[in-house]
Amino acid sequence: MARKKVDPSQKIIDASLKLAEERGWRPLELPEIAEAAGVSLAELHRHFVSKQAILDGFSQRIDSALLDELDDELELEEPARDRLFDVLMRRFDLLQPHRPALARVTYDQLNDPMALCGSLRQLSQSMRWMLEGARIGTGGLVGAVRVKALVAIYLSVIPVWLRDETADQSKTMAALDARLRRVEGLINRLNGSGDPARNGGHEEGAIN
């Protein structure tokens, strides 16, 4: 039986995270990552033009895996805030095996403003997809506000998640729930209330 060929881009991402966990993110060089992944530097370049692109690829991989789950399991009858809570906790669940590596990446990027700005661009895209996955619209001014609000919420919960040693991530869940409720009032004031997603469409009202 023929062995299934591993996508080189996935090998590069996995090798990068392993090295980050062992040594930190900032000191890593692209040739070192290529060697650990078992690919040439030219092959690495064909898939990723920078270390930030590797992180972006990892984030996109998580987003895709999550959206695949949601296609069959999202409960559209739930209130929008509950759907969004479910989506974000699923994302944390998918990230959990990589938490030690992501802790090192996060620490190093907090001390590198340029790298942090690069990660924030991808995070905004990911949070837009999290809202779409929860069937909450992201179009127009209100949609842009929702994305920015969710980026802020997510960034504020990340430190809690990184330190959460509970078996069921209860500290993370509590922090996320509190922050979603806190921002709910602001979104309600901006765009009223309602939940058209109950009828199968994207919600254009508040996160409620």
Image (cartoon, grey):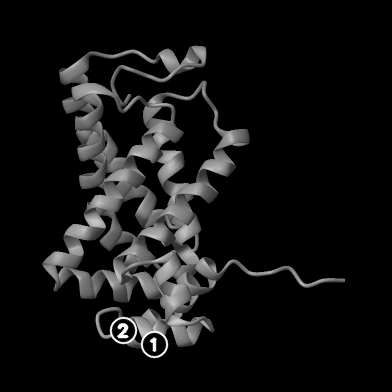
Query: In x, y percent, where is residue 121?
Result: 24, 51
Q: Amino acid at mark 2?
A: Leu
At x 53%, y 67%, the residue is 10
What secondary structure is marked by label 1? helix
What secondary structure is marked by label 2? loop
Query: In x, y percent, where is residue 190?
Result: 16, 19
The image quarter in which residue 158 lies: bottom left
Image quarter in which the N terminus is found: bottom right
Q: Is residue 6 above or below residue 144?
A: below
Q: Nearer the viewer, residue 184 or 14?
A: 14
Q: Nearer the viewer, mark 2 or mark 1?
A: 1
Crowdedness near tag 2: few (<14), some (14–19) or many (≥20) residues, C-alpha within 10 Å: some
Q: Nearer the viewer, residue 48 or 170?
A: 48
Q: Amino acid at mark 1?
A: Glu
The circle on residue 68 is none
Q: Is residue 96 above or below residue 62?
A: below
The image quarter in which residue 57 lies: bottom left
- State yes or no: discs 2 and 1 in contact (Cβ < 8 Å): yes
Query: In x, y percent, where is residue 58?
Result: 43, 61
Query: In x, y percent, where is residue 48?
Result: 39, 66
At x 31%, y 26%, the residue is 207
Residue 164 visible in the shown view: no
Q: Nearer the viewer, residue 16 or 73?
A: 16
Image quarter in which the C terminus is found: top left
Crowdedness near tag 1: few (<14), some (14–19) or many (≥20) residues, C-alpha within 10 Å: some
The circle on residue 32 is 1
Q: Nearer the viewer, residue 50 or 63?
A: 50
| Label 2 sits on residue | 28
At x 52%, y 81%, the residue is 39
